[in-house]
Image (cartoon, grey):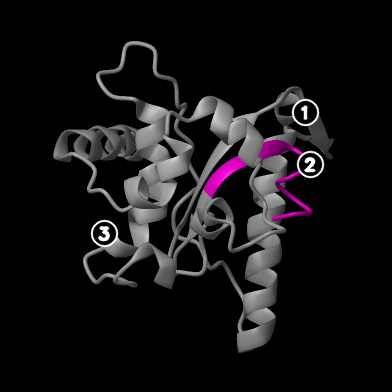
Amino acid sequence: MRRNLLPNCQVLAYCLMPNHFHFLIYATEVSIQEKRTGPIVMNKFSDGIKNLLAGYAKAINKQQGRTGSLFTKNTRANLVRDVDREIDYATTCFHYIHQNPLKTMNPLASKLDDWPFSSFHEYTGEYKKGLCDIPLAKKLISVSWDKFYEISHQNLSQEAIQKINSDREILDSD
């Protein structure tokens, strides 16, 4: 992540799950710069994601003595803007990402503190050398930061979760 994502964007939040991941990123001018690899042209952020996934697949394949693809679905992205939205979408996504291990069909943790693979620990101060641009997140995400821990544990409204999931379904049908 440090080698492939951070040079191309600012990470605001993340959560790594056994079968998927979530990133809330802030695209920069570098993110959209074109990169040519042979005949293929893509932006630097997309190229970073491609390299991240390829490197991960290579390491897992080597570790488990296997070959082939690990991922069955293409990586997708949602544009997070609060224009014309009924909810504070960026803030909702921020909390949704951190709460993901608790909200799966078979929860992976009973509280946010128990899941070590998310940026939640960066915001509580437990992880000092993290991936997130915390000052930028504090500027962009509407959270009472002095009450971050308590707010992070509050349930998201069903309306907010449905909105996030409906945006994901739209992408899945494309």
Question: Which residue lies most toward the front here?
Answer: 146
Name the residue beneath numbered marker 2: 7
Foreground residue among 95 and 32: 95
Residue 137 lies in magenta, yes or no?
no
- The span shown in magenta is 1-13
Name the residue beneath numbered marker 1: 30
Type of amino acid at the residue the image marks with label 2: Pro
Residue at point 35% right, 55% down?
99
Quadrant of the snapshot with the C terminus: top left
Residue 103 bears which disc, if any? 3
Does residue 171 appear left or right of residue 1 in this picture?
left
Q: Where is residue 55 shown, x and y percent of the image?
A: 71, 64
Using the rendered view, name the quadrant where residue 33 is placed.
top right
Chief secondary structure of the magenta portion: loop
Q: Where is residue 118 shown, x and y percent of the image?
A: 51, 59
Which of the two labelled residues, at mark 1 and mark 2, occupies the earlier sequence position?
A: 2
Residue 7 lies in magenta, yes or no?
yes
Using the rendered view, name the quadrant where residue 31 is placed.
top right
Type of amino acid at the residue the image marks with label 1: Val
Using the rendered view, name the quadrant where residue 137 is placed.
top right
Which of the two labelled residues, at mark 3 and mark 1, occupies the earlier sequence position?
A: 1
Type of amino acid at the residue the image marks with label 3: Lys
Which of the two labelled residues, at mark 2 and mark 3, occupies the earlier sequence position?
A: 2
Residue at point 24% right, 32% down?
163
